[in-house]
Amino acid sequence: MRRRRQERDGQEKKPLSARRRRNRRWHYIYEAVSLLLYGLLVYALCIGAVRYVGQKTMVEGSSMAPTLEDGDHLLVDKLTYRFSEPERFDIVVFRYLHLENSYYIKRVIGLPGETVQIQDGMVYINGEPLEESYGLEAMQNPGRAAQPITLGEDEYFVLGDNRNLSSDSRDPMVANVAREQIVGRAVVRVYPFDRLAALGHK
């Protein structure tokens, strides 16, 4: 009698054991799929953030000195200009049209529709001298801005803070910067750590 009961118990346990193995297998599959989907979501968010929200960039050269130095690492805000337009004195990153995957970083000086001219080392906007706290060194070479330049409805005139060592809108190769060229606005210097600072436009 006991033997038969043991045999019955053994027969009843086998399906339960198989069911557990099957459930465990589905559990592992579920965990693997969940992990994969989570990884894909994180990857998509990172790609979206880099493409549409912000990215890190590094300054090369001294055209923006002393505000920005060679080797400074910056955080570029790519979102703000989707809802508003660049303002005067913003530090912007824009595509250089004559070299693939090349970007410049300069300060916005002239806005769409304005007339910009450089005389005696000073910037004039619509015939009035521009009051600024950047680029205090008198410009030795006005370049193409020696004559009045009237900007189009989607064009900006940009200058480097290191006025006499900067290739900017005075140079015909850079010229007026179209709105569609502008990638974003530099907002924070994140490295070197001892120069960590927000980069206000005024």
Image (cartoon, rainbow, N blue to C red):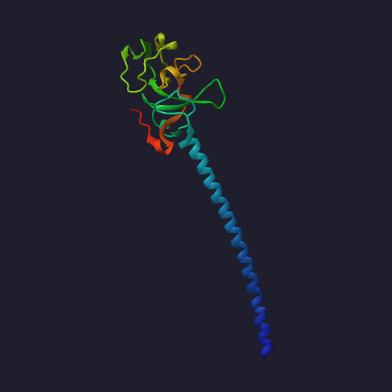
Identify which residue is drawn at 69% across, 88% down. Answer: 3
Work out which residue is located at the far top of the displayed protein and give it. 147
Which quadrant does the C terminus fall into?
top left
Work out which residue is located at the far front of the displayed protein and give it. 194
Q: How many marks?
A: 0
Tell me where residue 186 appears, x and y as whole percent.
42, 31
Left or right of 40? Residue 152 is: left
Tell me which corner region of the image, top left, top right, bottom left or bottom right, holds residue 68: top left
Position of residue 21 relative to residue 124, above or below, is below
Left or right of 64? Residue 1 is: right
Position of residue 70 relative to residue 145, above or below, is below
Identify which residue is drawn at 53% across, 43% down. Answer: 44
Tell me where residue 111 appears, x and y as whole percent.
38, 20
Which quadrant does the N terminus fall into?
bottom right
Viewer-proximal residue, 28 or 100? Answer: 100
Position of residue 152 relative to residue 28, above or below, is above
Tell me which corner region of the image, top left, top right, bottom left or bottom right, holds residue 159: top left
Tell me where residue 145 appears, x and y as whole percent.
41, 12
Viewer-proximal residue, 60 or 123? Answer: 60
Tell me which corner region of the image, top left, top right, bottom left or bottom right, holds residue 199: top left
Identify which residue is drawn at 58% across, 58% down. Answer: 30
Tell me where residue 5 appears, x and y as whole percent.
66, 86
